[in-house]
Amino acid sequence: MYTIFEIKGRKFIIDKINQILWIDYQKNKQPGDKIVSDKVLVHEEEFGQSLNDVRVVAEVVKHSKGKKIIIFKYKAKKRYKKKQGHRQPHTQIKITGIERANS
């Protein structure tokens, strides 16, 4: 089965432990730090607005940048052109576990 959870407003789907995901850059996290998401939307057969007793634990693996994209602006007959590049920073995480609080 699979689990859907949320980190900083973005939803991610995982189907196994030790899965690698790329998420938005986490400025205050260093490789080896833990990230815990309490916002689990679906876990196996259960679903709802937010499952309160389930949480996803992940470990930061590394920070890197994505593929370079080129932004090119051009206005015809005005001698205006502008070329700009951008590389979006990302954080790579590894899912270490899905925990359930003892009820």
Image (spheres, rainbow, N blue to C red):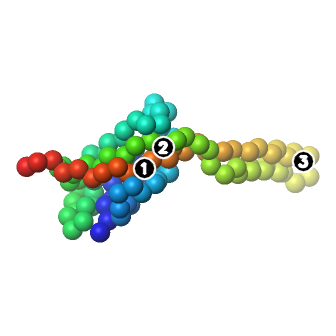
Q: Residue at x 44, y 41 (%)?
A: 60
Q: Which mark is residue 94?
A: 1
Q: Position of residue 74 (x, y in %)?
A: 82, 51
* Closer-to-camera residue (64/11): 64
Residue 100 appears in the picture as rendered: yes
The image quadrant that residue 48 belongs to is bottom left
Where is residue 71? Give x, y as percent. Answer: 74, 49
Residue kind at label 2, given as amino acid type: Val
Could you tell me which secondary element the residue under label 1 belongs to? Answer: strand
Q: Could you tell which of marks 1 and 2 lies nearer the N-terminus?
A: 2
Query: Callout 2: helix, strand or loop?
Result: strand
Outermost residue, left side: 103
- The residue sitting at 74% across, 45% down in the picture is 85
Mark-to-mark CA distance, 1 and 2 = 7 Å
Q: Which residue is mark 2?
A: 61
User: For residue 37, what is the image quadrant?
Assistant: top left
Would you say 55 lies left or right of 90 here? left
Q: Secondary structure at mark 3?
A: loop
Which residue type does callout 3 highlight?
Lys
Relative placement, left or right, of 47 versus 76 is left
The residue mark sitting in front, 3 or 2, is 2
Q: Are marks 1 and 2 in contact (CB under 8 Å)?
A: yes
Q: Is residue 42 above or below residue 64?
A: below
Which of the two labelled residues, at mark 3 and mark 2, occupies the earlier sequence position?
A: 2
> Alpha-carbon neighbours of circle 3 within 10 Å: few (<14), some, or many (≥20)?
few
Report the residue at 32% width, 46% height from top. Answer: 57
Q: Where does residue 36 sit, x and y in percent of width and height?
A: 32, 42
